[in-house]
Image (spheres, coloured by chain):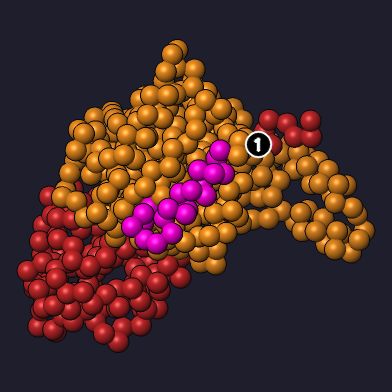
Chain colours: A red, B orange
Amino acid sequence: MAMDRSTAAPPPPADTPIRVLVAKPGLDGHDRGAKVVARALRDAGMEVIYTGIRQTPEMIVEAALQEDVDVVGLSSLSGAHLTLFPRVMDGLRARGLGDVIVIAGGIIPAEDAAPLEAAGIRAIFGPGTSTEAIVAWLREAVAERRAART
Amino acid sequence: MADARAPALPAPALPVDAVLAGDRAAIARALTTVERDPAGPLAAALHRHGGKAHVVGVTGVPGAGKSTLVAALIRAWRARGRTVGVLAVDPSSPLSGGAILGDRVRMDAGPLDDGVFIRSMANRGAVGGLALAASSAVRVLDAAGFDVVVVETVGAGQSEVEIADEAHTTVVVVPPGLGDGVQALKAGILEVADVFALNKADLPGADRAAAQIEAMLKLGHALRDPAWLPPVVRTVAPTGDGVDDLVAAVDAHAAHLRAGDGAGWRARERSRAYAELRRLVLARYEAAVFGAGGARPAAIDALVDALVARAIDVAAAAGAAADEAAARARATG
């Protein structure tokens, strides 16, 4: 026997990759931007759960819970963000997920940023944002969230 | 104690009771915990609470329609009053370690339902990663009380064979039109399938594909269970056609395993336990010899260099690697 018992101690657990739910609430079917972001996050080493188009806020909240994500990314190009995004926030808080980081993208007029941030959306990344900027912001925000949890 | 990871602080209370009570947030967090540490204290504590669920593996080539079929199966099981937990496994990128997990796109169509819990898992390409974490993730959903636990694998590959060690019943999903592809897959697939779902059965070529599978089975290929000839069930997942028949076939397989004194079921339980034990031990030894977390021991690199320089043969290098790992363990232990 070449190896004694202590040789085969369990390997230390690896860190959990950052988990992100990317969802499109509402009725618009334009998911190119969401897919570009999903792919960039994957290439940055994150696990991206992609739920597809036409999600209700309730479905998004339930998926975030089941998948135990750090981040929810909401995309909307339909103009319904002021209605739908706050419903996602309310649902997350109601399920005890108030510390999940929620970010938004798509077509969101500048004047809508304040009410969305008041509802708890942490950051809005509009057209032209570099994926590197999103990745860097997320890494920092998730590191803070995980540090606060332990 | 040999365990070098013994925590300096008292361990936080494990959420065992919350998982057993079916608390969905607790189940979700428990899955994260065992995915990170599949042989850790939570997995250990949940182990004795398992053994009730019927674990069903669903595998097949990419694009066979696995996720859509699982969605249809969820609806059929729920209509029969059974609760369903799903693990949907997708590959991690070997380059970045990240993953896009897209199975929910096709599974989330139903209304919100506390009798269903779907979790996406990346295989994380690590040492024994997929299989070990999947076994313990099944353990969480089993302990949480789901009647059926489905493990949907990544597309075709070695995981097809692994799933047979994870499940009581393995469903292999085959689309028509593979032609010789069915032939190519037969060695692996015939041995692990307990039920075939000939999916997309409304497409041309379905009859031929079903006939091919049935013919291969009747050739007397070495079946895993000589007393069970795997049925071929035709399904059209989006419409639900044939899904009741598929549920009936999966149930019939479970009944077959439990028939008589339940020796078939116990045999599957034994092969599941053996496979998990084997993977865990291999993972430990692999980490001991080749390093964990990307930290490859210098001695291994030196042996690789010696091999390339033809200064050592591979058998001698393997022996040296094992001896060196043992010496390293004695020095640190």
Q: Which residues, given as a range, are shown in magenta?
A: B199-218
Name which residue lies at 49% across and 33% down.
B229
Whether residue B120 is situated above or below residue B196 in the rendered picture: below
The quarter holding residue A92 reads: bottom left
Residue A57 visible to an observer of this rendering: yes
Callout count: 1
Q: Residue at x 12, y 50 (%)?
A: A94
Magenta span: chief secondary structure = helix
Q: Is residue B286 magenta?
A: no
Residue situated in front as seen by the camera: B184 or B93: B184
- The quarter of the picture where the N terminus of chain B appears is top right
Measured as percent of width and height from the top left, residue B172 is found at: 46, 46
The image quarter containing residue B205 is bottom left
Please indicate whether residue B250 sits to the left or right of residue B324 in the image.
left
Q: In the image, is residue B210 part of the stretch drawn in magenta?
A: yes
Residue A122, percent from left and from top: 21, 68
The residue sitting at the bottom extreme is A128
Residues B63 and B138: in front is B63
Tell me what residue is drawn at x 50 percent, y 40 percent: B193
Q: Is residue A39 above or below residue B278?
A: below
- SS at circle 1: helix
Which chain does the numbered disc 1 sit on?
A
Above-or-below relation of B326 to B158:
above
Q: Is residue B45 visible?
A: no
Disc 1: which residue: A8
Q: Which residue is pictured at 14% across the width and 61% down the height?
A: A56
Q: Is residue B181 left or right of residue B137?
A: right
Task: Kindly identify the amino acid type of the residue bearing the numbered disc 1.
Answer: Ala
The location of residue A117, given as percent across then percent down, is 14, 71
